Image (cartoon, rainbow, N blue to C red):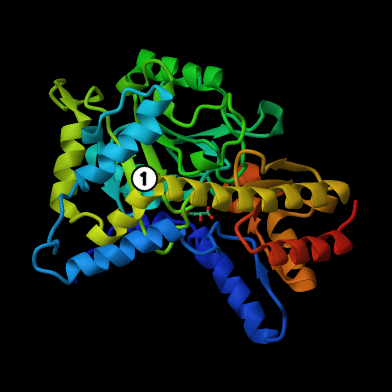
Amino acid sequence: MATINDNYLKLKAGYLFPEIARRVSAFAEANPDAPIIKLGIGDVTEPLPEACRTAMVKAVEDMGDRTSFHGYGPEQGYLWLREKIAQHDFQSRGCDIDASEIFISDGSKCDCGNILDIFGSNNSIAVTDPVYPVYVDTNVMAGHTGPANENGEYGGLTYLPISAANAFTASIPHEKVDLIYLCFPNNPTGAVASKEHLQAWVNYARAHGSIILFDAAYEGFITDPTIPHSIYEIEGARECAIEFRSFSKNAGFTGTRCALTVVPKTLMGKADDGTEVALHGLWNRRQSTKFNGVSYIVQRGAEAVYSPEGQAQTKALIDFYMENARIIREQLTAAGIAVYGGVNAPYVWVKTPNDLSSWDFFDKLLHTCHVVGTPGSGFGAAGEGYFRISAFNSRDNVNEAMRRVTEKFRV
Ligand code: MLT
């Protein structure tokens, strides 16, 4: 019999979101008339921007004509899209990033996991707690951790606690770690990092030869003009950081699939024999071997985000979700519930009322209000006693969910 990757057996029960979906379906099956409102997984609800749809319809037409048909595209993505991203998302903000350093992909979640292909198995790894579970689970699958303890913490990982006490931005560790996952605006807490905070991380990484894996999937939601959108706004980041971005949340592409990863050519790692090797070349090799690129049609849709109409329409989408976030924050605050985030991110991080555990609050909310959120403990031990509410839903649903929740929970 073929053997399996035993590391999978170390994984805790299910991936968080499928586990939530399982509980919600069981409830819905038993209560078919319950009008459930889902503010759990951060999945967008509003239609794709018209500019993107128009561009994709045109791209479908291109595919129907021999002269404009596209077969395999470049594994790294079409240059016309990469150049727009480089100019608009990076160079216009003073980041020294070239189109050739941008790799188009089908998702940040995929890239956050796939990136481990180019790193050795002996790196020490730091994650925040709470944390987007993909960073942890992909390291478990790759055999970079020991088994989980009773708190669900995996041996071998360094957990950096984030809480209200440190404004949900992890303190720089004393020990040396090789890979550090940072996510700002943060999923799940909605916190952002100041330029000074990120500079401290970059300084740390450069001093220790560490690499920062910077997840900026929610940068489009930043409203505070002093907050960096990219790690490359920070001096020295080209030497120590990889950045992940996505069209999923800002342009509604969760079902359409398009994202990007930036690997600067100046970023180096060390081979077993001690020689320095450029990570850009390794990622390029990995992508060329294991990935055939994002479809031409989808990349044309993503390109349209950068047209004047696309810019106006994505801004309207973001504003719409951020108004939802404001409603959630204000309604819960008025009900006496402590909330964080939701100002520069589409997630509101809620202290569970009456000291309920995260899953108890989840069950109570589902059973009494028919509202779904995400238990904070699903993001790590330090998330216990917290709950994440996503602002991705229709206005009517957000208003109705807040009406039900604040009616039942008032502290
Ligand atoms: C979330 O709810 O945390 C996100 O939807 C997860 C993701 O983007 O993969």
Residue at the image position 37 percent from the left and 13 percent from the top: 207
Quadrant position of the N terminus in the picture: bottom left
Residue at which label 1 appears: 112
Tell which of 404 and 383 is nearer to you: 404
Q: Position of residue 404 (x, y in %)?
A: 81, 66
Q: Splitting the image into 4 quarters, where does residue 101 fall?
A: top left
State the SS at label 1.
helix
Image height of 112 relative to 391, above or below: above
Residue 159 drawn at (x, y percent): 52, 35
Write the residue at 74% across / 52% down.
328
Residue extending farthest to the front is 308
238 with respect to 203 (left or right): left
- Number of labelled discs? 1
Q: Is mark 1 within 8 Å of ligand 1?
A: no
Q: Is residue 357 left or right of residue 196?
A: right
- The type of residue carrying mark 1 is Cys
The percent coordinates of residue 107 (x first, y second) are: 36, 52
How packed mark 1 is, by other alpha carbons closer than 10 Å (few <14, some 14-19, many 20 or more), is many
| Relative image position of residue 203 (x, y in whole percent) | 43, 14
* Residue 5 picture quarter: bottom left
Q: What residue appears at the point 63 percent right and 33 percent down from the top-left corner?
A: 168
Report if residue 248 is visible in the image: yes
Above or below, 49 against 112 in this view is: below
Nearest the camera: 30 or 42?
Answer: 42
Residue 102 location, quadrant: top left
Residue reaching furthest to the right: 411
Q: Is residue 367 left or right of residue 76?
A: right
Examine the rendering and report whether any part of residue 136 can be seen.
no
Q: Residue at x 22, y 64 (%)?
A: 3
Which of these two is toward me, 134 or 151? 134
Residue 216's place in the image compared with 18, above or below, is: above
